[in-house]
């Protein structure tokens, strides 16, 4: 596995499905992902200890794509493209919103629930 930021290709053979927690650990260097000769993934910690993963093997990707298609999920080259165009953050407005939201949360009693009829 080679991350795209380090020259890795964005194609199925260079992708692995991991949960948010382990995704972060991969980027922080606390989990290392290797593809074995049989297409299986090996996940190891920096101390060399490996652990199991429920991620699909490389040969299961066609089944995964088919299952996604049946669920109406369509991943394309534009799926993960952000709509952010580089504009700056309005810090005063953001801070004002955060403070107002914190104040609203402080004024909500423990008995109050949004899911009550």
Image (spheres, rainbow, N blue to C red):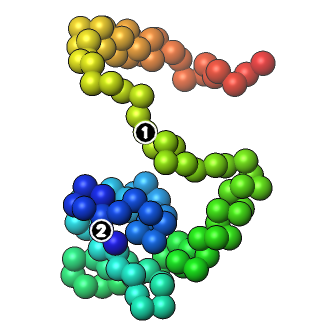
Give the residue pinned by disc 1.
Answer: 81
Tell me the quadrant of the picture where the N terminus can be found.
bottom left
Q: Residues within 10 Å of mark 2 (few under 14, many from 20)?
A: few
For residue 117, above or below residue 63: above
Residue 72 or 46: which is nearer the viewer?
72
Mark number for residue 2?
2
Residue at image point 65% right, 62% down: 65
- Kindly indicate whether the residue at mark 1 contacts the one at mark 2 (C-beta within 8 angstroms): no
Instruction: Report x, y in % for residue 90.
Output: 26, 12
Res 54 visible: no
Q: Residues within 10 Å of mark 1 (few under 14, many from 20)?
A: few
For residue 50, above or below residue 90: below
Instruction: Report x, y in % for residue 22.
Output: 38, 62
Q: Is residue 5 left or right of residue 81?
A: left
Question: Alpha carbon of mark 2 to alpha carbon of mark 1: how far?
Answer: 20 Å
Residue at image point 44% right, 63% down: 11
Q: To which quarter of the image does residue 93 belong?
A: top left
- Of callouts 2 and 1, the N-terminal one: 2
SS for dot 2: loop
Residue 117 or 52: which is nearer the viewer?
52
Q: To which quarter of the image does residue 57 belong?
A: bottom right
Instruction: Report x, y in % for residue 78.
Output: 49, 42
SS for dot 1: loop
């Amino acid at each position: 596995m080679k991350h795209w930021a380090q020259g890795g290709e964005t194609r199925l053979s260079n992708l692995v499905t991991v949960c948010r927690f382990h995704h972060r650990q991969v980027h922080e260097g606390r989990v290392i992902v290797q593809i074995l000769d049989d297409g299986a993934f090996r996940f190891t910690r920096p101390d060399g200890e490996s652990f199991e993963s429920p991620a699909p093997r490389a040969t299961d990707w066609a089944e995964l794509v088919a299952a996604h298609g049946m669920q109406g999920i369509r991943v394309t080259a534009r799926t993960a493209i952000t709509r952010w165009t580089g504009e700056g953050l309005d810090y005063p407005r953001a801070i004002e919103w955060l403070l107002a939201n914190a104040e609203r949360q402080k004024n909500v009693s423990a008995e109050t629930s949004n899911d009550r009829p």
